[in-house]
Image (cartoon, rainbow, N blue to C red):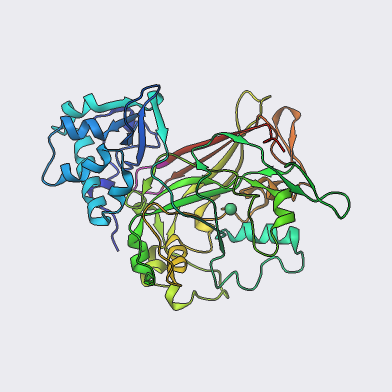
Amino acid sequence: MNLTDATHAPDLRSWVTSANAPGTDFPVQNLPLGRFRRAKSDEPWRVGVAIGDEVLDLRLAAQQCPWGDGVHELLQPLADGDLAAFMALGRPAWRRLRAALSAALAEGSDQGPFLELCLVPQAQAEMAMPCAIRDYTDFYAGIHHAVTVGKLFRPDQPLLPNYKWVPIGYHGRASSIGLGGTVRRPAGQLRGAGEVPVFGPSQRLDYELEVGVFVGTGNALGTPLTMAQAEDSLFGMTLLNDWSARDIQAWEYQPLGPFLSKSFATSISPWIVSMEALAPFRRPFTRPAGDPAPLPHLDSPFNQAAGAIDITLEVWLKTPAMAQPVRLSRSNMLDAYWTLAQLLTHHASNGCNLQTGDLLGSGTLSGPAPGQGGSLLELSNGGRVPLQLPGGETRSFLQDGDTVTLRAVCQAPGAARIGFGSVSGTITGAVKG
Ligand code: CA
């Protein structure tokens, strides 16, 4: 099975010099899309491509550069800042634009002299949400997270019997998804000392290390997706921080799951890394020996051969007292118990219609080792063993002024390294209770 093409060639270089730097997240093999405008300007939002330290402005590129047959039509919604309209066009269109952008940004391209005038330094760009997110669902595909958190709440039965059969998820809140920045500590109902709860600022504020995947083409109501159709519907991925107030969560989560403990903020990274860009990092999807195989509707030869994705994920923390951020954990998406296509297929399996721009969260992606937890809840053993930080500080949960940054990179032999960029959020004082 060959998922890659000329756009993935590891020796492909760009005339944008910074795209050839060894550590860049955005070499010419990546080409993620995001919505931006020049900072402090009032110009209309447009879609751009991250390339090295620059953004290729597709509004200018559509106006000022000659393009091959049909490419102008593909660029038009992007020039207008309407990424969703492009996402709705489907995979042939996504592939065609990727090929055109790859050729145009490659070393020696005769479009280079035109496109040089369409670059904006990323440092001078202001990013916006990539598209309107109508629905957001957060899953629970990280089995090591599920087991560790389950042990804290249910030592006798950490993993409930449905976990290995059905992708667990809940409907999240779309309106409070943003690109990070300032995250206000939520207030809510907390268990008090006696029978009566108290209302006040969360004292157990946490992050969750996740990835998000955007639905490109949706499905009609009443028409489930096959695994192959689900795979084809996925547009691309971002980092996702599912901020979580553990004390609010502990009081409210039974019997219907998380609600206000999660809905106050979710942060995603601004650049959508396409499923095409991730092709060199697809890996066989396997289950541990003795675990059940997925039911037939959640299984396919392609999913077994290439359903998993090798993405290294990191969490960094900077407290106000620190000069430099410190890495809290590193894990890999290969440890997820469900693939993205399985999550989407399951979501549509009852006939629910998924729509262009819908966002699915993976669930916290922790590794099997104790230091690989994708949340402070795991790293501090439920808050009982505070993390020791450089400089003598400790943390069980986040304090005001703390900045959490998620990062992700993909590396594999014979492939160019690509990255997701990052998403950061800084905790500020609580909402007025
Ligand atoms: Ca979550």
Extreme-bottom residue of the structure: 296
Percent of width and height locating residue 214: 41, 52
Q: Viewer-proximal residue, 213 or 432?
A: 432
Q: Is residue 426 left or right of residue 135?
A: right
Q: Is residue 366 at all visible to an observer of this figure?
A: no
Q: Dividing the image into 4 quarters, which one contains the N terminus?
A: bottom left
Q: Is residue 304 left or right of residue 384?
A: left
Residue 51 percent coordinates (x, y): 32, 34
Q: Is residue 33 left or right of residue 71?
A: right
Given residues 251 and 22, the one toward you in this image is 251
Residue 217 horizontal/vertical position (percent): 33, 58
Pinpoint residue 197: horizontal percent, then vertical percent.
81, 51
Q: Main secondary structure of the magenta part?
A: loop
Which image quadrant for residue 430?
A: top right
Residue 94 appears in view: yes
Residue stretch rendered in magenta on the structure: 412-419
The residue depicted at 17 percent of the width and 45 percent of the height is 73
Which quarter of the rendered picture does the C terminus lie within?
A: top right
Indicate left or right for 422 with 26 as reference. right
Q: Residue placed farthest to the front in the image?
A: 433
> Quick check: is 415 in the magenta stretch?
yes
Q: Is residue 251 magenta?
A: no
Q: Residue at x 36, y 22 (%)?
A: 41
Against 78, residue 284 (above or below) is below
